[in-house]
């Protein structure tokens, strides 16, 4: 199994595989996890009640950090989308408005895990250095 170095990069990959393609299962839902753990069923209320507004809910972080993604699934990723409205972000931080750097990708070391990545849409969120890193690997940065 692949080991990611940047959780935020992994989350973008999870978005593609779990929420867009439906190939990474089961589909994670923060409200389901909270219910299972007896923590209520309203992610917004949980976030506010536990001073987690504009932060990643620890239970979601733990889940996604531990989530294993096979090399075979990673090889199917040809395109990623960077956008503040990704579902995976809402599942991680139910009270988040996309106006800070909470989910910023810091490094592109994990590109090596995606041998067939050809395009990143919304790459302006990465900044010039990381966009140059994509280009150096032959990835189209839109």
Image (cartoon, rainbow, N blue to C red):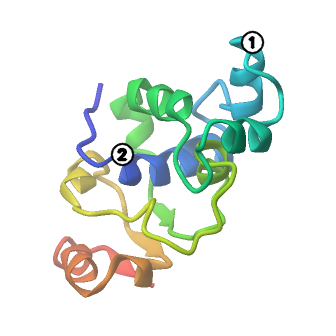
Query: In whole angstroms, how far apart are the C-alphas of marks 1 and 2?
Result: 26 Å
Q: Position of residue 87 (x, y in %)?
A: 67, 53
Q: Pick whichever, 135 or 43, lies toward us.
A: 43
Q: Is residue 64 left or right of residue 106?
A: right
Determine the secondary structure under disc 2.
Answer: helix
For label 2, count other residues whose C-alpha is less than 10 Å away and answer few (under 14), some (14-19) or many (20+): some
Compared to residue 109, the image places residue 130 above or below, namely below
For label 1, count other residues whose C-alpha is less than 10 Å away and answer few (under 14), some (14-19) or many (20+): few
Determine the secondary structure under disc 1.
Answer: loop
Q: Is residue 112 left or right of residue 120?
A: left
Res. 29 in view: no
Q: Is residue 80 left or right of residue 10?
A: right
Name the residue at 40% across, 52% down: 8
Q: Which residue is mark 1?
A: 38
Compared to residue 138, the image places residue 17 above or below, namely above
Disc number for residue 7: 2
Q: Is residue 93 left or right of residue 69?
A: right
Q: Residue furthest right?
A: 41
Q: Position of residue 122 (x, y in %)?
A: 50, 79
Q: Quadrant of residue 91?
A: top right
């Amino acid at each position: 199994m692949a080991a990611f170095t940047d959780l935020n990069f992994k989350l973008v990959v999870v978005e593609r595989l779990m929420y867009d393609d439906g190939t990474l299962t089961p589909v994670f839902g923060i409200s389901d996890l909270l219910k299972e753990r007896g923590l209520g069923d309203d992610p917004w209320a949980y976030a506010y009640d536990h001073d987690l507004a504009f932060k990643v809910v620890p239970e979601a972080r733990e889940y996604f950090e531990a989530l294993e993604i096979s090399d075979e699934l990673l090889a199917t990723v040809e395109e990623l989308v960077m956008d503040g409205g990704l579902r995976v972000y809402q599942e991680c931080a139910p009270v988040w408005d996309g106006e800070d750097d909470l989910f910023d990708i810091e490094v592109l070391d994990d590109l090596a895990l995606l041998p067939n990545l050809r395009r990143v849409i919304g790459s302006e969120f990465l900044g010039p250095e990381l966009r140059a890193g994509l280009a150096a690997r032959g990835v189209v940065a839109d």
